[in-house]
Amino acid sequence: MGDRLYIGIDLGTFQSTIATSKGDLHTIETVVGTPKDPVARNMLGRDTLFGEDALKNRLACDIYRPLAAGVAQDDSEHLNAAKDFVTHLIDSVGCDEYDEVYGVICSPSHISFTDKTNLVSILRGKLTAIMVVSEPFAVAFAIQELMGSIIVDSGAGTTDIARIVGRFPEDDDQITIAEAGDWVDLSLMSSIEKKYTGAQITKDMVRRWKEKSSYVGGDVKEVLVELSVEGKSQTVDVGDLIETACDGLAQHLGSAIKTIISGGDPEYQPLFRKNIYLAGGSSKIKGLAKKVTEYISDIGEVSVSAVKKPEHKVAEGALALAESMPDEEYTSIV
Ligand SMILES: Nc1ncnc2c1ncn2[C@@H]1O[C@H](COP(=O)(O)OP(=O)(O)OP(=O)(O)O)[C@@H](O)[C@H]1O
Ligand SMILES: [Mg+2]
């Protein structure tokens, strides 16, 4: 086919998205499965499974979340899984038909420099040239809020909070906190276990309940879920516990936002206070922007809003950046 393809990739600890200049937009859970034994291999008919497909067959597979926080990045099994995953994501958009592929990549902030080297080795041969940017910067680009804003990207593994001042952010323009979606899940899980002694629950069950019914502020809602208590089925109300766990996240976001604003140029601070955007999957908690506003209202008049379609914003911004950056900004990896 010839020509050049631009791609934007959001590699997330929980899910990853790829967007291309020919219009693809795919999201897939960052999960890799490999059949446990020859029987499983025969039955499944493939050596590697990804995303939903891997999860559906999880009892027959070893399951890896290769980009999750806390995974040792030099562990060879995880590294191979990461490699397979990124290759699968890129192959899903048919890069091979193009002479050149220019990509902007956002990777989780806990992935350090050595792992960026790993990233380059994974992408070599697939992409012509790459640029690595932070998730909040990609979001700012997607929503065209580049001249004085605060972007909060609250995903699964971490929340990244950055000051955006019309140039690439530098290290001290951004802070990362450990409180994000996984943290909400764990805190909800432990409060359910405390309230319903003997409750048999997994983090994935709790995450699904949260995704369906998350909210913070206002009247307490009833959220009925079914769980086993010592093997016996029971329906219980977890509405108040969901609110408390989400409120915990709102408080952490509030203090981190205050820190990042107060560390910025004083002349920009009024602008920052008026342009605070919440993105990432955890920004879908109902009432979150309002609650965060309450927690930071002591610093003056503030405006906090949640972006629309937060799960796509990082990849969309990465693609928009890819299309508008001059070639000199890229690092060639051929
Ligand atoms: N409706 C919802 N309410 C609350 N949380 C939600 C909702 N939908 C998704 N989430 C949470 O959003 C998180 C995933 O968000 P996202 O896709 O931005 O993460 P990620 O990019 O994979 O992670 P990271 O940026 O930390 O690497 C998960 O913790 C998920 O449970
Ligand atoms: Mg993310």
Image (cartoon, rainbow, N blue to C red):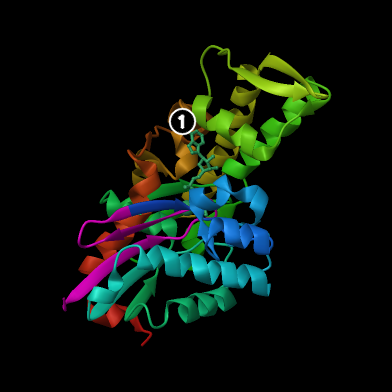
Against 36, residue 257 (above or below) is: above
- Name the quadrant containing residue 93: bottom left
Please name the residue shown 54% across and 40% down the image. Answer: 253
Q: x, y percentage for residue 257?
A: 50, 44
Specify whether residue 20 is painted magenta: yes
Q: Amino acid at mark 1?
A: Thr
Camera-nearest residue between 334 and 227: 227
Relative placement, left or right, of 27 versus 73 is: left
Please state the horizontal and vertical placement of residue 161, each as a whole percent of the image.
49, 51
Q: Mark 1 vs ligand 1: CB under 8 Å? A: no
Spot occupied by residue 34 in the image (x, y as percentages of width and height): 61, 62
Q: Residue furthest bottom?
A: 334
Residue 242 in picture, x, y percent from top left: 61, 25
Secondary structure state at the residue bearing disc 1: helix
Q: Start and end of the magenta stretch?
A: 1-25
**Residue 158 left/right relative to 10:** right
Asked which quadrant contains residue 21, the reply is bottom left
- Residue shown at 35% from the left, 48% from the top: 312
Q: Report which residue position mark 1 lands on.
A: 293
Q: Is residue 19 above or below residue 195?
A: below
Front position in the image: 263 or 231? 231
What residue is drawn where x is 55% and y is 66%?
A: 47
Quadrant where the C terminus is found in the figure:
bottom left
